[in-house]
Amino acid sequence: MQEDKANKSFFRQWRFTIILFCSVCAGALIGYIIGPKAKYIKFLGDIFLNLLFTAVVPLVFFSLSSAIAGSKNLKRLGKIAGAMLIVFVITGIISSCLMLVSVKIFNPAKNFDLKFENIQTETTGDISEKIVETFTVSDFPNLLSRKNILALIVFSILVGFASHAEGEKGQSFRNFLVSGSEVMSKLIKIIMFYAPIGLGAYFAYLVGVFGPELIGTYARAMSLYYPVAILYFVFGFSFYTFISGGLKGVKVFWANIFPTALTALGTGSSLAALPSNLEAAERIGVPEDVREIVLPIGATIHMDGSCLAAILKIAVLFPLFNKDFSGFGTMAGAIGISLLCGIVMSGITGGGFLGEALIVSLYGFGPEALPVISMLGTLVDPPATMINSTGDTTAAMLISRFSKEKK
């Protein structure tokens, strides 16, 4: 009897993950068989992605603002924010250093035959204007676009603090924010019923359209990135979750993270995976105030997978432009740029292009460098996004550990 209950419990916990795995494998097989024709079923994946993206903006707003508005301890909020900043930076540096060591051992640019002169490119736009455009918008309707997600986060935080500061007068509005958060959570669960079809179609498209590139010019760089990414995903995240909650933390993380990982892997967007991530963090046991603050912000500025990819792109471009990729200053600069690239990507599909443009501009590479690393970025985007998204969950677990109130 107990064995039957245990089997039912196991199946209930892993049922959705097993279904997603089967749909992903089926999609990949279809893509391999029909090749480029897989682009004709991509629309099924686009439907899933669009449903998630339309839900992301209200989800981020209600999650962040309700978490802050409903907080009874602003000191704890400050502790969460401080721990979040430290964890994001440290994990980003660790992932960057891991790829730095890897590219020094295994040269990813060896099979690239192109050689460019170091043509200097002019950067356009005032840095102060870029900061303003990143964190604010000029009109309220612009907040409703996922392209301005950082501005939405700033607005949501301010709304949360304002409603908290109003005390009893703001109680009705705080109830509205909490209720909105619950409704959006239920909406995400409904949308995820379509995930097996949507993700299966996306994997068919990825394998069918981009599969040939994996054995072409970029094979050496790919053969470096994918193993390093998988090692970081398995061992790095196991280490982080062990720090968070010992062996129990490791077990509960791996038991709940795969729906988020597969969603990120198939859609190529941390924001698309955010709804599933919030649900996974709840099942893992991350406190509500931590997950509803850390995960939306992490989906926009915490990008361990993108840090891995940025170092790889820089290591490929340096020898192509006859530059020496060595020395402490060069290494430290590459780590700093990799962290910056993670911030500017903002969690949207195709956001990696912004990071690539930043790399080309900051190093002064010729314009012909952009398509080279853009294709590389496209090929490493699925595992990079998976690490970006699931890395937010491990960060939330670490922050939960370090922001606990001492009794």
Image (cartoon, rainbow, N blue to C red):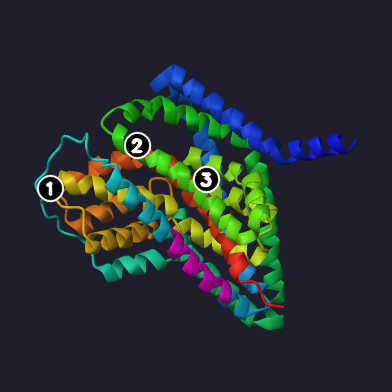
Q: Residue at x 67, y 63 (%)?
A: 287
Q: Quadrant of the C terminus?
A: bottom right
Image coordinates of residue 324 in percent, x first then y, are: 16, 52
Please say whether residue 58 is visible from this viewpoint: no
Q: Which of marks 2 and 3 is in front?
A: 3
Q: Residue at x 60, y 46 (%)?
A: 257
Image coordinates of residue 401 in percent, x first then y, are: 62, 66
The type of residue carrying mark 3 is Val
In the picture provided, is 160 more to the left or to the right than 142? right
With respect to residue 140, does 188 lie above or below?
above
What kind of element bears circle 2?
helix
The type of residue carrying mark 1 is Asn
Boundaries of the magenta span: 79-91
Residue neighbourhood size for the residue with mark 3, other residues' Cα within 10 Å, grouped as few (<14), some (14–19), many (≥20): few
Q: Depth check: 386 or 49 in front?
A: 386
Question: Pointer 3: what residue?
Answer: 234
What kind of element bears circle 1?
loop
Q: Which secondary structure type mostly characterizes the magenta part of the structure?
A: helix
Q: Residue 222 carries which label?
A: 2
Q: In which quarter of the image is the N terminus?
A: top right
With respect to residue 155, does 110 lie above or below?
above
Image coordinates of residue 50 in percent, x first then y, are: 52, 42
Q: Quadrant of residue 372?
A: top left
Q: Distance of mark 3 from mark 1, alpha carbons?
A: 35 Å
Asked whether disc 2 touches disc 1, contact meaning CB atoms under 8 Å apart, the reply is no
Q: Residue at x 53, y 37 (%)?
A: 47
Asked whether disc 3 touches disc 1, contact meaning CB atoms under 8 Å apart, the reply is no
Q: Depth check: 155 or 403 in front?
A: 403
Question: Pointer 1: what residue?
Answer: 322
For marks 2 and 3, the one nearer the N-term is 2
For marks 3 and 1, the one nearer the N-term is 3
